[in-house]
Amino acid sequence: MSATNEVLSHAGRRLRKSALIWGGVLALLVLTIVSTWPGFRDAETSFTDDLPESMLSAFGIADLSDPAGFLDSNLFSLVLPLLLICAAIAWTSNLTAGDEDSGQLEMELTLPVTRTQVYLGRFATVAAAMLGLGLVVLVFLYMCMPALELDASYGNVAAATFSVTLLGLLHAAVLYCAAGTGAARGAALGITAGVAGFGYVAQSLFPLSEALESLQVLSPWQWALGDGPAQHGFSLGGLVAILVVTGALVAVGTWGVNRRDIRGA
Amino acid sequence: MASSVIECTALTKKFGDFTAVNSLDLTVPQGTVFGYLGPNGAGKSTTIRMVMGVARPTGGTVRLLGADPAAPSSTTTRARVGYLPGELRLDDRLTVAQQLDHWAAYRGSVDPKHREALTERLGLRPDRAVRTLSTGNRRKVGLVGAFMSRPELLVLDEPTNGLDPLVQQQFLAMVEEARDAGATVLLSSHILSEVERVAERIAVLRGGQLVLQGTVAEIQAQARQQLTATFPGPPPVEELRALAAAQDVTADGTTVRLTLSGPAHPVLEVLARHRAESVVAPKREIEDIFLTLYGDNAGGTQHDAQVEGEQA
C-alpha cells in the first residue's frame, strides 16, 4: 500500500464515526424542517406578509408558501450551511492543527511520507466526507419531497445542496490554510469562524447599507447562495469563485506546511 | 574511519532571541552507538528534531544519511531511520496493533514476525487500546515502531523514560543487537549509566553547546582517580597534602582518601614508605565528569524553561 493510500485510509477511519453521526444529525434536520412544509403550504395568509422587505432580505426569507422559497428560507439560507461549515472545520481542525498541537503529527512526518501527502490527503478525505454529507441531505430531501408534496425542482435542490456543501468545504480550506501556515488549533478555529461570520453578515446585512452593499460580492455565502439556489439553481460565477478560492487556500496551506517547523508535543 | 550517518556542521537553532542549539558540530559514525547526553533542556531534542527534519536549522547544516532531512524527497531516507521522539503521542482511537499497522503501512518493509517478537519481548499486548496504556507501555509501542523495520539508523530520544528496570535492560539488549547487526544508534538521554553501558562514543550538550565529545575510554581517562588507603597507624596526611598529585586529602582514623590529579608514583611511594595495609582504587567513573558538567544547573534549567516557552 502506498503512503498516500495509507494517509487516506487512516484519515477516513478517523472521520468515519463522526461522519456517521453528522450524517444522522443532518438527515434528522432535513426530516424535521421539511415536515413543517404542509403547515406553510396550507396557511391561509403568508407568514411573510407583515415583514418588511429589508428584513426578508436580511434573513434570506423568500416566499414561504412556494416550495423552493420554503427550502431556501428554512434550510439552505442558514441552518444547513452553518452545520456543514461546523462539520468541515471540526474535521479539518482535528486532522491538521489539532494533530500538530497534540504532537501526533510530529511522529507521522518522520515516517516515509511527505508533508504534502499527509496534508493534501487529509483535506481530500474531508472533502470526500463533506460530499458524503451533501449526498445524505440530498437523498433525504428526495425521499421526503414527493411524500410531502414539496414540488421544488429536483435539479435546483441538487444544485442548492451542492452549493452549500462547497461553502462548507471552502471553510475547511480556510482552516487548512491557517493550520498549514502555522496557526495553532484555537487560532485556526478563530480565523475560520471569523471568515464564516463575516461572510454571513456581508451576505445578509450589507445589502441593507448603501455604503456596504457593494461588498456583498466578497461573501462566500453570497457566492454559494446567490438569490436562492433552490429557486434559481447554480450561480456559475459563485461556484467558480468558491472553487478558485478553495484551491488557492489549499495551495497556500500546503506551501506553508512545507516551509516551517512542526510543533512538538 | 567509518563514514558518518549524521553530520551536523555549525548547526544552530534560534527561537527569537534565544539560541537553543549553538553552532553544533557533531558527527555520528556508521555502525556505532552514539550517546547524546545533557541535562534536561540542553538542546538534545531540538537537535534531534532538526536531524529528523521536523524542525529547520536557523544556521548551519544537517545531513541524515547524506541527505537534507527536511527536503520532501527525503522520504526514502526516512524509510531507513527508526525514530522515537522524546514526547511520543499516539492515536488514542487505535489499538496497539492498529498503531503499529499504521506506521508499518508507511514503511512497507516490516517483517510481521520480527514485529511480533519485539511486541512479545517488551510485554505488549497488541489488542490493548492505546488510550488505556501507561506512559511506559506507550513508550514500548514507540520502541517497537522504531525497531520493527530493522532500520539502518535508530534515533532514540530519551527512550527509557517511564520504562521499568527490567524493560530498560531489554531495551539496552535490543540496542546492542541492532548495533551488532550493523545499525547505527543515536541514543539521547540525561542519564549517563544507561548510555555508558552501550555507547562507544559520547557527546555532551549543555546550554545548546557541545561541551564534551569522545569515546567512552577517552572520557574515562579524563576522570580523576579516587584512591583509599589504610595504614597500621596514623596516616601521613600532611605528607600527602604536600604532593601536587594528591587532591582532596581527607583522613578518617587510619584511613585516608584522596583524588589523584597527576602521576601516581609520588603518592604510591609515600603509601609504600608508610607501609599502607590496603589500597583501593575503584574504576574511574565518568559520572564525576558529568556531575561537574551538569553542576551549573542554572544554565540548563534556564535554557529548558526558555525552550519550552518558545515552543509553547
Image (cartoon, helix red, strand yellow):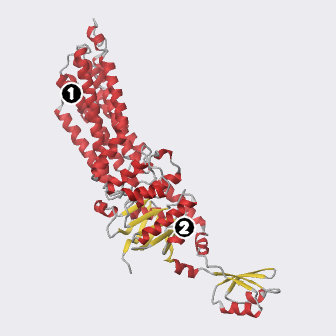
Report the disc number at residue B194.
Answer: 2
Measuring 32% from the left and 32% from the top, which residue is drawn there? A84
Left or right of residue B253, residue B84 in this image: left
Residue A248, percent across and down?
25, 46
Residue A206 x/y as whole percent: 29, 29
Question: Which element type, helix, strand or loop, lies under badge 2?
Answer: helix
Q: Who is closer to the viewer here, B163 or B223? A: B163
| Residue B272 place in picture, x, y as percent | 73, 92
| Label placed on residue A61 | none
Is A6 left or right of B249, judged from the image as shown? left
| Residue A232 falls in image quadrant | top left
Identify the subunit bearing mark 1: A
Q: Which mark is residue A158?
A: 1
Examine the rendering and report whether any part of residue B200 can be seen: yes
Q: Nearer the viewer, residue B16 or B230?
A: B230
- Residue appearing at x 30%, y 21% in the figure: A74
Q: Eyeballing the image, is B303 above or below A71?
A: below
Query: Please, what is the three-letter code of the amino acid marked with disc 2?
Result: Glu
Q: Is residue A213 visible?
A: no
Circle 2 residues within 10 Å: few <14, some 14–19, many ≥20: some
Q: Is there one chain holding both mark 2 and mark 1?
A: no
Residue B65: x, y in percent?
Answer: 34, 69
